[in-house]
Image (cartoon, rainbow, N blue to C red):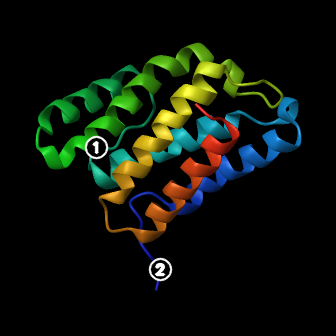
Amino acid sequence: MNDVHVIEPSLFDQIDKYLKEFQESPKKADASRLRTFLENFFLQLFANELKRPITAIGRDAKLVSTRIRVQRKDAADAKLRRLLTRFEELCDLLPGITGQLSRPGESAPAHFSIRFMNQTLGAMAAWAEIGQDEALKTRARATRAAYSAVFPG
């Protein structure tokens, strides 16, 4: 029997690969893995959890996210709201750094690779903790810890 996941836990492999590359040779680490991970995580979140599929990360998706976040006022939705806030920031950040996240050998800007990724992985792990998917909880928690060990901040 195949397990059905809201977010496919193997998606976190992209971060694992990036961290391994970065530790072996920072100048050769493929920062596009970060972008691929984030895009796919949020596409799955909107389609599978929120039932509001988006086709791209950008202005229109940010508006969808903002509407959902404002409507979800219950205390139980606080971790989802935090995650949606991270997504909305990604929508603002991505156009300015897409080039740096598209080519192997380009390093991601520090504000993105340290602050944004740590905060976003933290929000993902916190959101996963309230769900029932143990595999997702485990992967999100482990990835957050591994990432912050390499990129403290």
Looking at the image, residue 31 sits to the left or right of residue 127; the answer is right
Residue 71, image x, y percentages: 13, 35
Which of 60/133 is in front? 133
Looking at the image, residue 106 sits to the left or right of residue 97; the answer is right
Q: Is residue 73 visible?
A: yes
Q: Secondary structure at mark 1?
A: helix
Residue 146, image x, y percentages: 64, 50
Q: Residues within 10 Å of mark 1 (few under 14, many from 20)?
A: many
Q: Residue furthest top?
A: 96
Which image quarter holds the C terminus? top right
The residue shown at (62%, 35%) is 152
Q: Residue furthest bottom?
A: 1
The residue shown at (28%, 43%) is 80
Above or below, comparing residue 65 to residue 130 in the picture: above
Which numbered disc, 2 or 1, marks the residue closer to the eye? 1
The residue shown at (31%, 36%) is 82
Image mark count: 2
Above or below, comparing residue 3 to residue 8 in the picture: below
Residue 43, located in which quarter of the rendered image? top left
Mark 2: amino acid: Asn
Would you name the residue on which mark 2 appears?
2
Please tell me which of labels 2 and 1 falls first in the chain: 2
Q: Residues within 10 Å of mark 2 (few under 14, many from 20)?
A: few
Looking at the image, residue 125 sits to the left or right of residue 40; the answer is left
Looking at the image, residue 50 sits to the left or right of residue 20; the answer is left
Would you name the residue on which mark 1 appears?
80
Residue 6, image x, y percentages: 38, 60
- The Cα atoms of the two marked residues, 2 and 1, are separated by 26 Å
Residue 32, located in which quarter of the rendered image? top right
